[in-house]
Amino acid sequence: MLTIREHRLAGAIHRVDVRGGKGISLLSYRCRQALSRIRLRGTMQRTPEGLLARLAPQLTRLEKRDWELWAIVSVTGILVSLGLLALVLPAAFLKDDNIHFEINVSRPLALGLVVLVALLNTYLVSRRLDIRRLREELISTTLQQQLIEQQSFTDPLTEIYSRRSLDEIAGRFISHAKRLGNPLTFLMADVNNFKQVNTKFGHLTGDTVLAEFAVLLKASIRGSDAVVRYGGDEFLILLADTTTVGSERVIDRINQHLAEWNMGGHLYGFQLSASIGVAEWHDGESLDEVLAVVDQRMYRHKTLQCSPRAIHIMG
């Protein structure tokens, strides 16, 4: 279910003024981006398994040191208590009918015992504070590293995976396909006539079109799939457990979303379309080989593209 804030943002998207059809609806784009961030917030707040795997051993070692300090404190307390009890109540250990005790302790020895106990307590307290500080620094440093890694793997404009993350993302998908023997299909999508957008409407509008196109692609795939900004106006889609025939459904959804976007009249005199190449990965193929195939098919059909809707070629 949508929250109240999501309903308000969705309403703002529909009420935005297109300004007579000229120029792109920046407010609509910002609303869509905010709505997307709200929906993804629950997923982003989940602790990644990799982060837990990195933290668990180090936190375990710190907890072990913490328990060791507690053991030292407990054993020391027991020994001191037994020693004092043996000095103060010797008759209790000798099982005598009368209790008589007399203690002669030199002043230096008494002061030494007091200083020793004080130093021991100071050491234990300082060590506990150090362990607490190390635990906080460990968690903070690991979270910062995870954030930096996520930011480096995310394209700042489109908020999808960047080219830098391609090797890792594709490696996961290929490993999954190998392990389970399931199909894996790559789509290469390229925005047609994108230079006209930059020339006619400016680079800021061009950036917004790319961000909107990325939103359309994400809306056309499942949560188990991935979209990567391959470079410029080219986007790579990885479809897990999907054959070439099954990718037709994804392409149909892209076509539908493009048609709906164009009906909104976001850009006066321009229809957003894309050329899409399709290639299914086969066991034994490297990432570079399948990328070369899907890129070639996309460009081969791009030269024949003249329809305002997305087109593709499967080879």
Image (tube, rainbow, N blue to C red):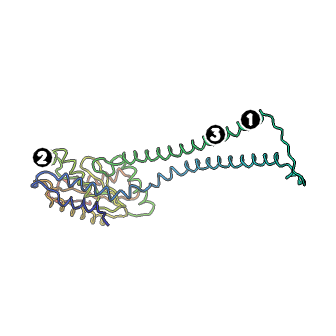
The residue nearer to you, when weighing 33 against 294, is 33
Q: Residues within 10 Å of mark 2 (few under 14, many from 20)?
A: few
Asked if residue 138 lies left or right of residue 192, the reply is right
In the image, residue 305 above or below residue 145: below
Secondary structure of residue under mark 2: helix
Query: Which label lies toward us, 2 or 1?
Result: 1
Mark 2 or mark 3: which comes first in sequence?
A: 3
What residue is at 66 percent from the left and 41 percent from the top? 121
User: What residue sits right under mark 3 in the picture?
Assistant: 122
User: What residue sits right under mark 1 in the picture?
Assistant: 111
Asked if residue 70 lies left or right of residue 169, the reply is right
User: What residue sits right under mark 2 in the picture?
Assistant: 200
Q: What is the number of callouts on the image?
A: 3
- Kind of residue at badge 3: Thr
Tell me the quarter of the image containing the C terminus: bottom left
- The location of residue 174, given as percent across then percent down, is 40, 56
- The location of residue 183, given as percent across then percent down, is 37, 63
The residue nearer to you, when weighing 90 against 143, is 90
Tell me which corner region of the image, top left, top right, bottom left or bottom right, holds residue 221: bottom left
Q: CA distance from mark 3 to mark 1?
A: 16 Å
